[in-house]
Amino acid sequence: MTDDLLKEVIMKKTRNESLAWSPDSQQGYTRNRIERACTENRPVLRKFAEWLSDVQDLAPGSITVRLGSACSFVDGLTTCSGMDCARTFQALTPEGVESFFVRYGKHHGLGSRRNMSSGMRLFLTFAFSQGWVSRELSDAVPSLPSYRLSGLPRGPSEEELSILLRPPWEGRCQRRDRAIVYLLATYGVRRGQVSALQLEDIDWKAKAIVFTAHKRGKAIHHVLTPAVAESLADYLQNERPTRQCGDVFLRQTPPHLRLSPGAISALVKSRMKRCGLPPWSPHALRHAFATRLLRADQSVKAIADLLGHRSLATVAVYAKVDHTRLREVALDWPEVAA
């Protein structure tokens, strides 16, 4: 191998490792998004990111999403006006806000429109704190109708879960994938909690497992079931790469970094495909877990605790899938008198 080729291989490996997911890399995603914005807008967007963290107290993942929408909003307006950010927003009118959102909505789906709506409101609130706009300008952002508890939690049925957990397990990391799917299906935890699982979180003697708090919720304590214990022990003893770190689930390729939440989603969907099931996400297994608890006559308080939610209102939507209880409270349809 020539010196130039060797240098190129080393540089590529270093670059891939620097871009690899890690617990702290979310801030890197935020910085990279700012660097893709117009040069003159970057200082304002950095200040906006700090404001989202310090004033709004948003989680790193939420900051990345809201900042991405704000970058498109700010770049789009300043490009059209030909002025700097401060003067552009000082001249902005409610009609201009609505016009930008309508143009954006023509080329994006509902999810992207919702993200843009939230990002625009947050940036206009930030702009008010800078003295560029009036407080009421954020009200000009069009609202998208959203009705609380209007949706229905969807997840695999008991029969589909049985198929999902049934052997054989295929793939390069079948022991790891099996342990992850068992954790998600058995405890209804989030993919981020599985990604963050540490060796010290598993108490083999007490037969207990703890998942860290997520989204400002509560830590979750569960009994370590025999099936989960067996799958974890099989992975840790026979497949987990040898690396001195506390992370349970690691990438199979060097440098064996912690497995990212995105990778967990990918492996779950791959497993679903192999089993001939719909491409359910890890969160669908959480819905199935909550529904299973409700049908087992568990209280809403118990379900909230096992899901790590602080608010009972967050799990109220699951009452809609308990068809047996809903039939009990349904009124008979009045007969029309002849």
Image: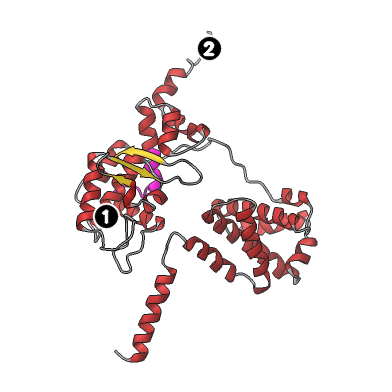
| Amino acid residing under circle 2 | Val
The spot of residue 88 in percent (x, y) is 76, 65
Q: How is the image coloured?
A: secondary structure
The spot of residue 313 in percent (x, y) is 52, 33
Q: Which mark is residue 27?
A: none
The spot of residue 51 in percent (x, y) is 65, 57
**Among the 4 quarters of the image, the one containing residue 83:** bottom right
| Amino acid residing under circle 1 | Arg
Residue at 37 percent across and 25 percent down: it is 297
Residue range in magenta is 276-288
Asked whether 206 or 54 is in front, the reply is 206
Number of the front mark, 1 or 2? 1
**Among the 4 quarters of the image, the one containing residue 73:** bottom right
Asked if residue 283 lies in the magenta stretch, the reply is: yes
Give the number of marks: 2
The spot of residue 104 in percent (x, y) is 63, 59
Residue at 41 percent across and 57 percent down: it is 262
Is residue 11 shown to the viewer in this render?
A: yes
Identify the residue under disc 2: 336
Identify the residue under disc 1: 176
Q: Tell me the CA gap for discs 1 and 2.
A: 61 Å
* Disc on the earlier residue, 1 or 2: 1
- What secondary structure is marked by label 1? helix
